[in-house]
Image (cartoon, rainbow, N blue to C red):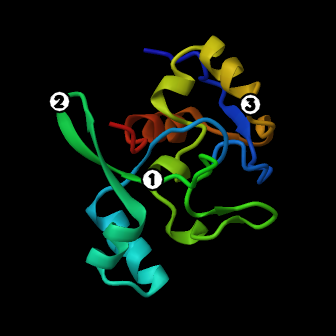
Amino acid sequence: MAVWYESGLRFTCTQCGNCCTGAPGFTWVDGPEIEALAAKLGLDEDAFRRKYIREVWRGGELRTSLMDKKNNDCVFYARGVGCTVYAERPKQCRSWPFWKRVVETPEDWQDAARECPGIGRGALHDAASIGASASDDGIP
């Protein structure tokens, strides 16, 4: 079955920070991501969890998210710098904007483009890689 983005989609990150700041939200992380982030920061996993993790009930399950700063920015986003853990950023962050809910319809893609200046510009991503990202976007 063909997808609406069969010819691919353009996206290049502008490092604007819009996806890391703004309204409160969740940045879902799993065990290996927590381990990598803790190592990056030179912390043991327990110390990392105490400082940077919150547990959230979603869909009847206890899930793990990074904490937000008081202004709702991602705990690892620094204004004027960007992501301070970029190489170890969670799958949810790495897969943006090719999340299942963002590429489901052309309208969803256009809605996301209103907040993300990199959508529709720059590198052309093929349908196969977009589909793979959307099917494993790190979002429960």
* Sooner in the amino-acid sequence: mark 3 or mark 1: 1
Residue at the far left: name it.
60
Element type at mark 3: loop
Mark 2 residue type = Gly
Residue 91 bears which disc, if any?
A: 1
Residue 3 bears which disc, if any?
A: none
Give how far across and how far down residue 86 sits, in percent: 60, 67
Q: Quadrant of residue 107?
A: top right
Indicate which label's residue lies in the foreground, 1 or 2.
2
- Residue under label 2: 60
Mark 1 residue type = Lys
Q: Quadrant of residue 98?
A: top right
x 67%, y 26%: residue:
112
Q: Nearer the viewer, residue 11 or 55?
A: 55
* Sooner in the amino-acid sequence: mark 2 or mark 3: 2
Element type at mark 1: helix
* Sooner in the amino-acid sequence: mark 1 or mark 2: 2
**Quadrant of the drawing holding the C terminus:** top left
- Residue under label 3: 115
Element type at mark 2: loop
Q: Nearer the viewer, residue 35 or 106?
A: 35
Give how far across and how far down residue 44 sits, in percent: 31, 83
x 34%, y 53%: residue:
54
Mark 3 residue type = Glu
Are there few (<14), some (14-19), or many (20+) residues within 10 Å of tag 1? some
Residue 119 versus residue 37 in the image, above or below: above
**Position of 80 compared to 134: left or right?**
right
Residues tagged 1 and 2 counted as in contact (Cβ below 8 A): no
**Position of 6 compared to 100: left or right?**
right
